[in-house]
Amino acid sequence: MEHAKILIIDDEEVVLDSCKLVLEPAGFKITTASNGTAGLALVPELDPDLIFVDLKMPGISGFDVLEHLHATDPNRVAIVITGYATVSSAVEAMKKGAYDFLPKPFTPDELRLIARRGLERHRLRQEAIALRREKEMLRENFAAIVSHELKSPLSALQQNLFGLTAELEDRMSDEQKARMQRMKGRLDDLLKLIHTWLRVFSVDVNKIKEQFQPVAVGQVIARAIENVLPHATRKNIEIASDVREPLPAVMGDAVSLAEVLGNILGNAVKYSHPQTKVQLTAAADRGAVVIAVSDNGIGIAKEDLPRVFGDFYRGRAGAAMDSGCGMGLAISRRIVEAHDGTISVESEAGKGSKFTIHLPANT
């Protein structure tokens, strides 16, 4: 935090001078401004790590300064200093983006302490931003590697295998034909896995939103059930649907929402025991449409619950019971969040799971 840049905006010269006297010996670079307009003008060039703002100033107020700072860069760390400290003014300042509140008069130790706390907050925010950027770069690089280094040669191998099978059809024994079929099956599985990886890394929230229109939730549910029904039938699992009409429409993309419900219903069927039931309910509730999918299957261990919606998640019980790549719920979470909704899970190992989706109604 040494050499950190601190901007102090206050109309009292004695406050500016005293703050400089206290903070500069600690190794901080201090810049001052006597009003909000001058302070805001300094921000783009100075790019301070921490900003102190007085609330009561001539011209634009400290509240206006906070609002402008937050609008231009929500990650700015600003601390309010004022001689008119009240609970209401503190609450209002926090609403406008202030990190902390320092009432006048304050001691040098109090100023140094809150400055270091604000700079630590700035450091943590910058680290979080850097981690997000790094994660996005890793995602992009991974998608490129999967697409070019894996998908392309596997597709070429698949085409050559198809051609070879056709050429040798009359000369192969039944055992050789069976081997060919197994190879084709393994290649199909690999290509489907790669397609799923690319899908989870290429979900474009903005592109999904461009296609939004009023969607009838009942129709989305019917489509999802229809897609999952063959798998459920093979395991002799009943999918019971309780849709409490009339349901309000939601603004969204019907295909993407059907994919979400298909993923959740598919998992419920996959991880349920044969001859059991999967229950789906849908109802309007306080300006939202709430869809819940419950099963009595293998459930999710408590320690795995926080990671359920992460990329590549596969619980230990699920991995032992059935195959999968752990991408479906990650895709589902991104799609639901693109619809300004939420998705959550309640589960207990050995007793089943309940996934709940809240989507804002189109009112």
Image (spheres, rainbow, N blue to C red):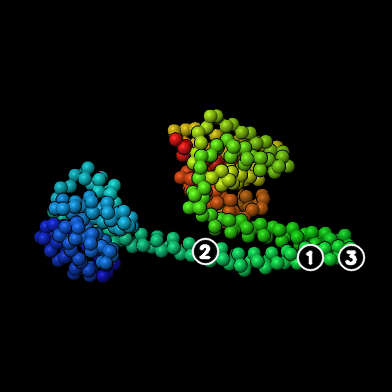
Residue plotted at (33% across, 55% down):
74
Above or below, 160 relative to 97? below
Mark 1 secondary-structure assignment? helix
Spot occupied by residue 303 in the image (x, y as percentages of width and height): 52, 50
* CA distance separating discs 2 and 3: 46 Å
Name the residue tied to disc 3: 171
Q: Amino acid at mark 1?
A: Gly
Does residue 5 appear in this view?
Answer: yes
Residue 274, percent from left and from top:
70, 40
Q: Label 3, label 1: how many angstroms apart (C-alpha)?
A: 14 Å
Q: Earlier in the sequence, mark 2 or mark 3?
A: 2
How far apart are the two marked residues, 2 and 1, measured between alpha carbons?
34 Å
Question: Is 310 in front, or is 9?
Answer: 9
Within-10-Å neighbours for mark 1: few <14, some 14–19, many 20+: few
Which amino acid, by three-letter code, is at mark 2? Glu
Q: Quadrant of residue 118?
A: bottom left
Asked if residue 69 lies left or right of residue 187, the reply is left
Cβ–Cβ below 8 Å for labels 3 and 1? Answer: no
Tell me, for residue 163, which label it has, or none.
1
Residue, far top: 245
Determine the secondary structure under disc 3.
loop
In percent of the image, x 14 and y 53: which residue is there? 58
Residue 140 is marked as 2
Q: Residue at 20% of width from left, 66% of height from top?
A: 30
* Left or right: where 122 falls relative to 350: left
